[in-house]
Image (cartoon, helix red, strand yellow):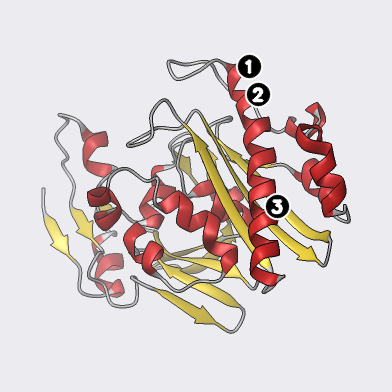
Amino acid sequence: MGYLVAASLSEVLDALGKPDAAVIAGGTDWFPAQGTRPFKGDLVDISRVPGLRGITRETSGWRIGGATTWTDLIRADLPPAFDGLKAAAREVGSIQIQNAGTVAGNLCNASPAADGVPPLLTLGALVELVSARGIRRMALSEFLIGPRKTALMPGEVLAALIIPELPGTAQGAFLKLGARHYLVISIAMVAALVTLDRDRVAQAAVAVGSCSATAQRLPALEADLIGRSLDDLRAAGTEIIVPGHLAPLMPITDVRGSADYRLEAAATLCVRALHMAIAQGENAHG
């Protein structure tokens, strides 16, 4: 097995042309997943490739480089729409994992319980995939195709996440339920992104993780929220959510919780995350 610390993106792509080559950045998911199995190919470390680490403002939104760590994200000066993603970043493993692990690595690992996915779905994230064949972009929802399965093709590297332009008043929130507070694999988690127009909801996005093979947006709930007054939502309480809103979810029963419990937890977290986003949006924008 060879280990290459790549100095350029072209060097990465050349190395990926070899059989059984694999990309790592922080390696916090990749190494534990190998267990005791020997790896016969080459490891291509992209953590020092210029341009792959960091968050930049672009004319049409934001670009998060593929080697950007969770700590980089937490420390970045970003608008309130990213508050949910920052909250999720603080839930990823330990501080040591946040310092080494990358946002793109979390996506390529494709765990149904990946903390970063629900807030990125609410942000409308696109993935930018680069190979010797060229560049292609797709929605994150299309990139994640199942547990530990992505649309990444041989020879490709996830070079960046693209976040489209969002309203200045958009406010994000994230909540996670686990069996303990620290180092938790979630039972259920919810991200919400709400844009207010005075006392009404102008735009809304809600995504649930750990309750299906991949995290899911809730389009019926989102549609029902648009145009509703904040007083109406406060008065509705938990009745904001009706069973049809949760139709995209297919939770399983495992050691962390039953399917029914997960569904109940998801509904409760949706209500709390929405109220949190609305309250923070009101406070921030009067």
The circle drawn on residue 260 is 1
Residue at 50% x, 38% y: name it: 176
Dot 3 amino acid type? Ala
Amino acid at circle 2: Glu
Front position in the image: 83 or 156: 83
Label 1 crowd bin: few (<14), some (14–19), many (20+), radius 10 Å: few
Q: Which mark is residue 264?
A: 2
Q: Which residue is mark 3?
A: 205
Q: Is residue 259 left or right of residue 202?
A: left
Q: Earlier in the sequence, mark 2 or mark 3?
A: 3
Residue 24 visible in the snapshot: no
Which of the two residues, 93 or 102, is positioned nearer the viewer here? 93
| Callout 1: SS | helix
Q: Measuring 73% from the left and 63% from the top, which residue is drawn there? A: 195
User: Quick check: 223 left or right of 1?
Assistant: right
Find residue 65 and name its label. Answer: none
Q: Earlier in the sequence, mark 3 or mark 1?
A: 3
